Image: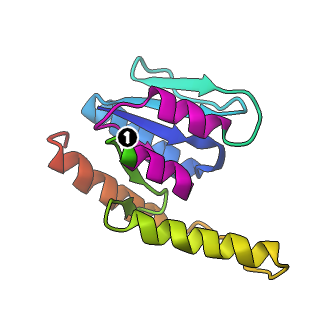
Amino acid sequence: MRIWVDADACPVPVRDILFRASRRTGIRLTLVANQPLRIPSSPLIDFMQVASGFDMADKAIVQYMQAGDLVITSDIPLAADVIASGGQAMSPRGELFTTDNIASRLQMRDMLDTLRASGNTTGGPAAFTAANRKAFADQLDRLLTRLGKP
């Protein structure tokens, strides 16, 4: 198992949680972004820089991930591709995307895109909070424990 991070928009507190989890569990962690990121020196933690452009990080993640890998992303279409490829996907706010909820999440995303395209202001995501950080850490711990990686 490897953890992949769609790192361009991943909050720093989530990356820090993932760095600690990787060291604690021995799970390889790869951050993928189109701009340089600072990562701790560790044989378990990698950084992959991709070309700038629409969905370049997403394409790289889908290309290299394997069934059973975990992908951290807030990108709903990427989460759907990961699930279709046999992987697991979780948002930086701790929401686990599953075969049971991904279709409705895609429909909601598409509806909001349609509203924005027609000139309606839908607003962006709420600010990342301490409660979001805790929800992410708790969900990651549950997932890793279930996989036998406490």
Bounds of the magenta segment: 56-83
Please tell me which residue is depicted at 50% across the width and 21% down the height of the picture.
41
Report the residue marked by disc 1. Answer: 85
Return the x and y of residue 75 as percentages of the image width and height: 57, 54
Residue at coordinates 45% horizontally, 53% vertically from top-left? Answer: 80
Please tell me which residue is depicted at 70% across the width and 29% down the height of the picture.
Answer: 36
Quadrant of the rendering where the N terminus is positioned? top left
Quadrant for residue 121, please give it. bottom right
| On screen, residue 40 above or below 93 | above
| Depicted 133 relative to depicted 111: above or below | above
Magenta span: helix, strand or loop, mainly?
helix
Which kind of residue does numbered mark 1 sit on? Ser
The answer to whether residue 85 shows anywhere in this view is yes
Q: Quadrant of the C terminus?
A: top left
* Left or right: where 67 falls relative to 147: right
Residue 94 position, x and y percent, is 41, 62
Q: In the rendered image, is residue 123 in sight?
A: no
Query: Magenta stretch: residue 77 in it?
Result: yes
68 inside magenta stretch: yes
> Is the image coloured rainbow, by chain, by secondary structure, or in one colour?
rainbow
Q: Residue at x 58, y 35 (%)?
A: 59
Classify 65 as above or below 77. above
From the viewer's perspective, tell me whether residue 13 is left or right of residue 95. right
Assign a secondary structure to mark 1. loop
Residue furthest to the top? 43
Crowding at label 1, few (<14), some or many (≥20) Cα neighbours within 10 Å? some
Task: Provide residue 62's location: percent of width, then percent of height.
Answer: 49, 35
Depth order, front residue of 25/65: 65
- Picture mark count: 1
Outermost residue toward the bottom in this view: 120
